[in-house]
Image: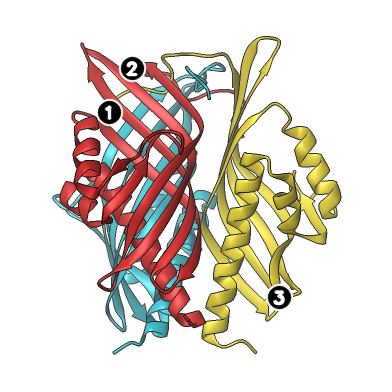
Chain colours: A yellow, B cyan, C red
Amino acid sequence: MMDALEKLIAIEEIKLVKARRCRAVDSKDWELYRACHTPDCKSYALGSDSDPIVGRDAMTASVEKSLIGKTTVHHVHMPEITLTSPVSAEGVWAMEDMLWWEHKGVEHWTHGYGHYHETYEKHDGQWLIASRKLIRTRVDNGTGARPDAMSAGQGA
Amino acid sequence: MMDALEKLIAIEEIKLVKARRCRAVDSKDWELYRACHTPDCKSYALGSDSDPIVGRDAMTASVEKSLIGKTTVHHVHMPEITLTSPVSAEGVWAMEDMLWWEHKGVEHWTHGYGHYHETYEKHDGQWLIASRKLIRTRVDNGTGARPDAMSAGQGA
Amino acid sequence: MMDALEKLIAIEEIKLVKARRCRAVDSKDWELYRACHTPDCKSYALGSDSDPIVGRDAMTASVEKSLIGKTTVHHVHMPEITLTSPVSAEGVWAMEDMLWWEHKGVEHWTHGYGHYHETYEKHDGQWLIASRKLIRTRVDNGTGARPDAMSAGQGA
């Protein structure tokens, strides 16, 4: 059994690995990204009905390939971490992601929202992400650079 | 008196109930929303000068009604939690909310920013939200689907 | 040496001073802003290659002047705090900032993303920000009030 202090330490360490994972994506530090996950981590990037990507090597290769030439921002919020044993945990995070890239001289973007439903495992004294499922709330897509966008309506 | 560990446990539990509350709103889990608040919770949705909505039953009915047909994202950040006793606390959170809905075939949206000023109480061993006041920094409103919005200016 | 509980207390206190600093900026509470920093705090607002602004008095004067007439939102996320001694620490935060202001009857805005790389010091029992460097991921700028911006594409 874990006492209250051990649980708080674990929760903080799990928040840290999640923070590192998001920073790794947005800074394209693929070695750091890989190191945040268990060797057999499962990623259900499109929800639980799809087949997962299995293993941190495959996940790293997949995300690196998908983000070539893209600027990205991944922010996660409001963690709900539950310890299920001294070496395992579950977590839910609200997320927001923004991607920008150029294709044939036109800027494209995606702006999405959702929740990550994850599990974590402690390997050799270190908490790692063991599975990830993303449930989307909304995704907007578009193209074009508009110097006058995003400033609308009744500012207060 | 609470010792330092008890305070950290309380702060983490208060962060958890706030996270659950926001997730409940955006996933429209009204039973979960209700369970995050004290029976006599007060909601000053429009600032402290307005009359509050009183009671979690009335608050739940009000928010459920106001969000019918709307997709919402509520994100809260940077909690400043202060324990005022072993069973009471105050908190300030930065917030951002986005709402989208359709009216007569046109998509409408609201995008707002502000700070929640809240109090919390521990009831039967569980921290709950006891009051909420929202001070807005800015609110933008608009209509229309623009496939080319939100990508502007000097990307770097 | 710090034990695990002392480290968690320090991490929570550092998160608090950062939260207060951002709330101070957006509510233009310059006395609070000043009180979040060490007397000789260094701010590398434009990255590590530029000369820093040195000292909380100069930093406060600079930010106050730069934000006259502007509405701002500064949100920081996913802290990675590392204690380097009982009285010093390092931290990385993801950030997003939005600024709006009017110039010659036209509304202007900036919307940026990046990471703060900071250090912290404990002075007289209180954790304060001792240095700040902002590494930008992307900055968008624009003008004009568009009631129909920001609602784009395949909502889901």
Answer with the quarter of the image where residue B67 lies.
Answer: top left
Label 2 and label 1: CA atoms lie apart by 9 Å
Q: Is residue A120 left or right of residue A22?
A: right
Horizontal and vertical percent for residue B97? 41, 42
Q: Position of residue A57 (x, y in %)?
A: 85, 50
Residue at which label 1 appears: A155
Residue A52 visible in the displayed image: no
Q: Residue at x 32, y 23 (%)?
A: A153
The reply to the same-chain question for discs 1 and 3 is yes
Q: Amino acid at mark 2?
A: Ala
Which x, y percent locates residue B44?
24, 54
**In this rendering, position of residue C67 left or right of residue B74:** left
- Gap between marks 1 and 3 measured at Cα: 49 Å
* Amino acid identity at mark 1: Gly
Residue C145: numbered disc? 2
Side of B83 relative to A4 (left or right): left
Residue at mark 3 to residue at mark 2: CA–CA distance: 53 Å
Give the total of numbered labels: 3
Q: Chain of mark 1?
A: A
- Of the residues under marks 1 and 3, which one precedes in the sequence? 3
